Image: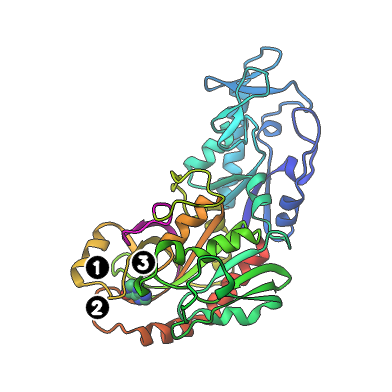
């Protein structure tokens, strides 16, 4: 996988203050991917060190009052040409910089206050639909013993649990809000394993309870809160789904967004939600673009066929009618399932980074589907699913 990276994060002394600003997490990522190093300011011939620059009203100014907007634009255009030639899907750029900042940049008053906005180069990359993040995202997604990656396994995908080198097992029934009387449906086991996969700290939850079993949203999202309490900052949800003909095919998929048709929401259903500051949670980019892009890159590198698309979460347990499948097609949905939607809301409310992986086992709205067929079909993709997840863990 190719990744565009700000030179200063790799340790090159090219910033305004003449220093490097290396990030250990970014440097580690750079060892595992093909790096396309960029520094738009050096590309424009700006000296390093130079006086601090900040953006004000769309223009870039040096502290000494010089307007360097055209230099920054020229450097950004040169770096964009390099980025385009590389066809890299992801860029990791220096946070807050007037060239490279994403979401937050210095506001041009020389008070070192930050304002919402994009660096000149970052904006160009985003227009190209390249996923642009800063070192903060790479650092926040990096797993450690304190911050393992949570993995929730769906119907037929439980085999991945056997890869875990276990340190500790946790009976689901000891988890707050997990229903005491719940017993796993076929293909599920109700015991989380804390340990490592290929040396990466993980907590694997091999199965879940569903709304269609009569449980409420607080109960079906209890594993997410448990993962958060254990320190997990990244959570990978997997589930079997039906695919919507015309928008997707049978096989593995990366979820890009969701429509919650369950009629439930974990943030509406109980009054004491620990660790959630506000129930009014931003659900744009519910599925973390950085993780989606890594997953796509891994799939391409490994030659695993994976599609991407929008997920619709239904209450179930009946499968969709033909009319419902046709409606979902019109809405742009690719995958339809009976889990995940509420869990993703919970994870986002807790500030976790979310990756949604699915295995589309059958065409939604077609008569041949049975629960047993879904499990059998999911198992036949277990190898590819396993390779994909291991590849993603390796890059985190
Ligand atoms: N619809 C909903 N959920 C599913 C399906 C389906 O067709 N297949 C597997 N899970």
Q: How is the image coloured?
A: rainbow
Dot 2: element: loop
Residue placed farthest to the left in the image?
323
What residue sits 32% from the left and 64% below the top? 247
Which residue is label 1 attached to? 325
State whether label 1 is within 8 Å of ligand 1: no
Residue 274 or residue 340, whichever sits in front: 274
**Which numbered disc, 2 or 3, marks the residue that appears first in the sequence?**
3
Can see residue 324?
yes
| The one of 270 and 259 positioned closer to us in this rendering | 270
Measure the alpha-carbon separation of dots 2 and 3: 14 Å
Decide: is 368 above or below 267: below
- Using a 10 Å C-alpha cutoff, classify the residue at mark 1 as few (fewer than 14 neighbours), some (14 to 19) or many (20 or more): many
Q: Are marks 3 and 1 in contact (CB under 8 Å)?
A: no
Of pointers 3 and 1, the one earlier in the residue sequence: 1
Q: Point out the stretch of residues depicted in magenta.
A: 251-268
Q: Which residue is mark 2?
A: 366
**Which x, y percent locates residue 266?**
42, 57
Q: Is residue 118 magenta?
A: no
Q: How far is the residue under mark 2 from the one under mark 1?
A: 9 Å
Mark 3 and ligand 1: say if the CB distance to the nearest ligand atom is below 8 Å.
no
Q: Quadrant of the C terminus?
A: bottom right
Mark on residue 335? 3
Q: Residue at x 24, y 78 (%)?
A: 366
Q: Are marks 2 and 1 in contact (CB under 8 Å)?
A: yes
Q: CA distance from mark 3 to mark 1?
A: 10 Å
Please check the rendered image and state whether residue 258 is part of the magenta-colored stretch, yes or no.
Answer: yes
């Amino acid at each position: 996988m190719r990744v565009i990276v700000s030179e200063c994060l790799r340790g090159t002394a090219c910033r305004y203050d003449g220093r490097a600003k290396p990030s250990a997490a970014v440097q580690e990522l750079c060892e595992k991917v093909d790096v396309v190093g960029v520094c738009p300011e050096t590309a424009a011939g700006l000296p390093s060190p130079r006086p601090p620059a900040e953006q004000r009203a769309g223009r870039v100014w040096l502290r000494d009052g010089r307007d360097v907007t055209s230099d920054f634009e020229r450097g950004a255009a040169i770096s964009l040409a390099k980025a385009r030639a590389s066809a890299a899907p992801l860029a990791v750029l220096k946070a807050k910089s007037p060239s490279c900042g994403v979401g937050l940049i210095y506001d041009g008053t020389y008070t070192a206050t930050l304002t919402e906005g994009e660096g000149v180069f970052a904006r160009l990359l985003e227009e190209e639909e390249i996923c642009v993040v800063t070192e903060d995202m790479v650092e926040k997604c990096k797993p450690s013993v304190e911050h393992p990656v949570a993995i929730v396994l769906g119907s037929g995908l439980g085999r991945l649990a056997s890869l875990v080198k276990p340190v500790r097992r946790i009976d689901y029934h000891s988890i707050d809000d997990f229903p005491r009387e719940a017993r796993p449906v076929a293909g599920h086991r109700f015991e989380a394993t804390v340990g490592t996969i290929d040396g990466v700290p993980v907590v694997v939850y091999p199965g879940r309870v569903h709304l269609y079993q009569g449980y409420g949203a607080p109960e079906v999202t209890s594993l997410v809160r448990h993962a958060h309490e254990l320190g997990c900052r990244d959570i990978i949800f997997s589930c079997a789904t039906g695919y919507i003909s015309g928008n997707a095919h049978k096989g593995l998929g990366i979820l890009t967004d969701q429509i919650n048709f369950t009629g439930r929401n974990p943030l509406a259903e109980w009054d004491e939600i620990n660790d959630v500051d506000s129930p009014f949670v931003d659900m744009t980019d519910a599925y973390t673009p950085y993780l989606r892009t890594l997953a796509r890159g891994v799939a391409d590198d490994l030659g695993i066929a994976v599609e991407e698309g929008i997920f619709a979460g239904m209450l179930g347990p009946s499968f969709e009618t033909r009319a419902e499948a046709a409606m979902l097609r019109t809405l742009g949905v690719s995958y339809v399932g009976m889990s995940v939607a509420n869990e993703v809301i919970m994870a986002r409310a807790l500030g976790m980074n979310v990756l949604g992986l699915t295995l589309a086992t059958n065409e939604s709205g077609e008569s041949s589907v049975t629960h047993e067929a879904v499990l059998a079909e999911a198992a036949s993709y277990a190898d590819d699913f396993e390779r994909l997840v291991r590849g993603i863990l390796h890059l985190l």
